[in-house]
Amino acid sequence: MKQIILILLFSVTVISAQWSTDPANPQSLGSGVQAQLAATSDRGVYVAWLSDGNNYQVYLQRLNSSGE
């Protein structure tokens, strides 16, 4: 009986989740801190930041001159 209730509760939370499908307007799941930028010679940029969850994690993303 407990398993059935847990499965139903889990199913309801997954079914009712609302995520943005528009890549120009992504869903924000948190905020980053200490963002740093470094330009490249081909007009791109590296962006680095820390997540501000329970354990900080380092992220690095490279964007080209078109922002991709």
Image (cartoon, helix red, strand yellow):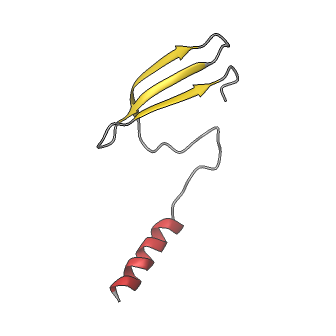
Q: In the image, 63: left or right of 50?
A: right
Quarter where residue 29 is shown: top left
Q: Is residue 5 above or below residue 53?
A: below
The residue lying at 43 percent from left, 78 percent from top is 7
The residue positioned farthest toward the bottom in the image shown: 1
Q: Is residue 62 above or below residue 56?
A: above
The residue positioned farthest toward the top in the image shown: 41
Q: Nearer the viewer, residue 42 or 20?
A: 42
Count of numbered labels shown in the rendering: 0
Q: In the image, 3: left or right of 68?
A: left
Q: Nearer the viewer, residue 23 or 37?
A: 37
The residue lying at 48 percent from left, 42 percent from top is 28
Name the image quarter holding the N terminus: bottom left
| Residue 68 pos. (x, y %) | 67, 30
| Residue 4 pos. (x, y %) | 41, 85
Quarter where residue 35 is shown: top left
The residue lying at 47 percent from left, 72 percent from top is 12
| Residue 48 pos. (x, y %) | 46, 25
Q: In the image, 68: left or right of 18?
A: right
The residue positioned farthest toward the left in the image shown: 54
The residue lying at 30 percent from left, 41 percent from top is 55
The residue positioned farthest toward the right in the image shown: 66
Q: Nearer the viewer, residue 3 or 40?
A: 40
| Residue 16 pos. (x, y %) | 51, 65
